[in-house]
Image (cartoon, grey):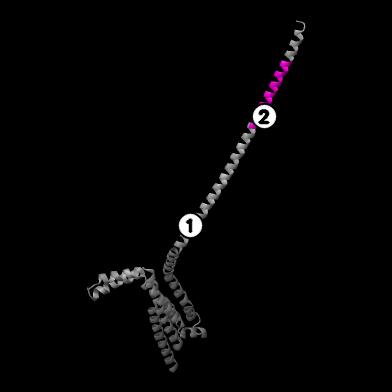
Amino acid sequence: QGLSLPWARVDACVGQRMISTLSTTHHIRVLCGSIAVSRRSGRGKAECALGTTSGHRQGLSTKGVLTRRRVVGTGARASSVSPGFGTKGKARSCSVAMKGLPETLFTIGTVAVLPLYGAMIGAPKAEMTQNAMRSHLPFMLMGALYAAAAVVSLQSVDAKALVDVFFANTNGDGVMSIARHALTLLSGFLATAEPASCMWLHLLSLDLFVARHVYLDSLALNVPAAHSLTLCCMFGPCGYLAHTFTKAFMANLEGEESGVVGH
């Protein structure tokens, strides 16, 4: 018994050391296991991240290819559609230009005759005024403007419709019916841009022709013509009538003066 107690103590100490060693080993294994698990989870996350990045890149590349295909397709469609669209655009631009041409001709004709009237009224005896009014260039210009306006009027849809209505209303009704509906036709023309510009240029040309005759006749007879030319600017026949009265008045006045001098 005396010997068994020390051995028992030795066995107890050895057992405790073995238990502590086993527990330490268990802790180490557990720690290694947790490290391995963490490494595996890190690799998994990294692989997931790499997979997401590669997938995103593939998606972007796919989108880029689709976008390029769409752009190419759109370009092909645009190239296939562009000739028709260009034709329509040219037709629209031509129609817009034709619609704006009457206003342009109207403005050019009105502005062109004003300096001539100003020169005849303000400086009637100037050499430049006499040369301009004896020339045929002003009337050639007005003739060209009138011809362009007439062409535009013949292509006007509204003017053609008015003419069709006129002939439909006067078909076989005689001269009186034509005379009665002619005023309606003219009023319809004045309400349409193309015929109205043509008629306006016609009136400007005739008034200028009357004013030219009044101006040259006043120079030859040495009679005042400013008032007559002013009337010719807007009312050609009235200006000519005023010039006729002026000539008669000046001739009567000169006859009285010559009679007084003779006495």
Q: Mark 2 and mark 1: span between their CA atoms?
A: 60 Å
Q: Residues within 10 Å of mark 1 (few under 14, many from 20)?
A: few
Viewer-proximal residue, 46 or 134? 46
**Residue at x 71% of width, y 19% of height:** 18
Residue topped by disc 2: 32
- Point out the image quarter for the N terminus: top right
Q: Residues within 10 Å of mark 2 (few under 14, many from 20)?
A: few
Disc 1 residue type? Gly
The reply to whether residue 187 is in sight is: no
Residue 20 lies in magenta, yes or no?
yes
The overriding secondary structure of the stretch rendered in magenta is: helix
Q: Is residue 1 placed above or below 199 in the rendered structure?
A: above
Tag 1's secondary structure? helix
The reply to whether residue 183 is in sight is: yes
- 254 relative position to 30: left or right: left
Q: Is residue 262 placed above or below 249 in the rendered structure?
A: below
Q: Earlier in the sequence, mark 2 or mark 1?
A: 2
Residue topped by disc 1: 73
Viewer-proximal residue, 113 or 79? 79
Residue 238 on image: x %, y %: 38, 78
Task: Please report contact status of discs 2 and 1: CB closer than 8 Å, yes or no.
Answer: no
- 248 relative position to 70: left or right: left
Based on the displayed image, in which of its 4 quarters is residue 162 positioned? bottom left
Question: Which region is colored magenta?
Answer: 14-36
Disc 2 residue type? Cys
Residue 2 on image: x %, y %: 77, 5
